[in-house]
Image (tube, helix red, strand yellow):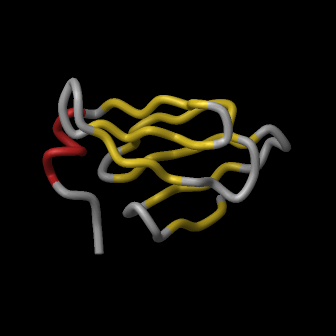
Amino acid sequence: MSWDKAYVNCGVAKVDGRIVRVYKDYASYTTICPPGKPVDARWSGDGVVVTLENGKVVKFSSQTNYRYF
């Protein structure tokens, strides 16, 4: 499964404490919970790339599927 195109087209991901908010439009978002404390989150193609406090990088291809780089 992959991100709904509305999220990809909006292209906004923000770190909020231990979660990342991924926006569908200016008021609607869903959250993802990375396996560690996030310090940065950005869209890269059709996935959200999250940099963790320990230096590891995780790419979320959907709200629940991710892999380490």
Q: Residue 59: where, in percent of width, then height?
A: 53, 55
Give the quadrant of the C terminus: bottom right
Residue 61 vs residue 46: left or right?
right
Q: Quadrant of residue 37?
A: top right
Q: Residue 36: where, in percent of width, then height?
A: 75, 51
The residue closer to the viewer here, 3 or 56, is 3
Q: Residue 38: where, in percent of width, then height?
A: 68, 39
The residue closer to the viewer here, 49 or 34, is 34
At 44% from the left and 48% from the top, the residue drawn is: 31
At 24% from the left and 36% from the top, the residue drawn is: 28
At 58% from the left and 54% from the top, the residue drawn is: 33
Residue 34 vs residue 46: left or right?
right
At 14% from the left and 45% from the top, the residue drawn is: 6
- Most distant residue in the right direction: 54
Give the quadrant of the N terminus: bottom left
Above/below status of 15 relative to 51: above
* Tag count: 0
Q: Residue 42: where, in percent of width, then height?
A: 46, 34
Residue 20 vs residue 68: left or right?
left
Above/below status of 43 relative to 1: above
